Amino acid sequence: MLGIVQGRLSFSGKKLQCFPKKPLNEFKLASKIGYDFIEFFGERKKNNNNPIWTDKGIKSYTKASKKYNQKIYSFCDDYIINHSLSGKKTLNEIVNTIKQLNKLNIKKYILPLYGKSLINKKNKKKVIENLLVISKICKTKKIELLIESNMSPKEFFSLKKKIKSNNFYFLFDTGNRVLLKKNFLLDICKFKDEIKHIHLKDKNFKNKNVIFGKGEVKFKSIFKELKKISYKGSFTIESQRGKNIKNQATENYIFFKKLINQYLAV
């Protein structure tokens, strides 16, 4: 399945990762272009206008999903970038978020371990404790828990041993991995079946998200590696909107749909 993250189908502010002012309007365009789903996200600062926080909002998402044949599939919680995953308050917010997401029947819950939630020696023990709690809750709700991180395969497998859960997986982000300035294609084969979802974006070495083809990511090479591991997971496009939002979103869809059909079609 190929989706696109919220805020890339409408202009709602100068920031790239910006919650859309009218999120329901994006369903129609996503459907028209051909996307399978829109990936929802939680902002770094809690946004009370996000429909997921009310039953009315959840009903509106469900209605739009059915009307425009867009699956409700994944949620990336950027809240933890500005609020440490080691904190009790953050954990409580996450537990509440999962409760709401369960009403939407979300399949994948993504935790980006960046910013204040980057794992280090000081917070590692507490982060792992909280991940254990989160993982258990997700499992009871039949939601896959994915972490998005620049950690190595070795570091991830070490972490997974501590979590001891069969619903704990890895999200591979093409733009973020290229910043490591190493042959991250080898990592794909090492992560292998642990990769359950992929964020597609292009970046330059200045850490700027750019139009596909303008950065350092070699997507054909990535898809060749994904073919080697028989990847059967999903994708979310996290690109720049471009000067013409509709045209750019359409071009992105066509580009990646072609790669998926070429390398991963059964």
Image (cartoon, rainbow, N blue to C red):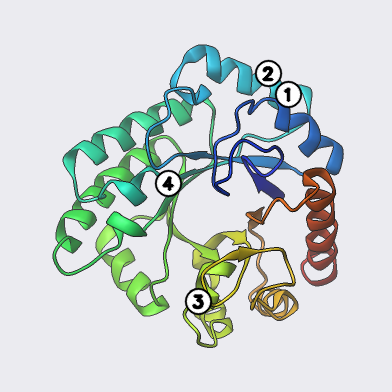
Image coordinates for residue 87, horizontal then vertical, percent = 18, 45
* Residue at x 54%, y 30% (from the top left corner): 105
Q: Earlier in the sequence, mark 2 or mark 4?
A: 2
Residue 78: mark: 4
Q: CA distance from mark 3 to mark 1?
A: 38 Å
Q: Which mark is residue 179?
A: 3
Q: Are marks 1 and 4 in contact (CB under 8 Å)?
A: no
Viewer can see residue 38: yes
Are circles 2 and 1 on residues that touch, CB within 8 Å?
yes
Q: In the shown orientation, is residue 184 left or right of residue 263?
A: left
Disc 4 marks a residue whose amino acid type is Asp
Q: Pointer 1: what residue? A: 66
- Could you classify mark 2 by the number of other residues whose Cα lies within 10 Å: few (under 14), some (14-19), or many (20 or more)? few
**Residue 48 x/y as whole percent:** 42, 23
Label 3 or label 1, whichever comes before in sequence order: 1
In this rendering, is residue 248 above or below 23? Answer: below
Q: Nearer the viewer, mark 1 or mark 4?
A: 4
Residue 63, label in figure: 2
**Residue 46 sits above or below residue 124 on the image:** above
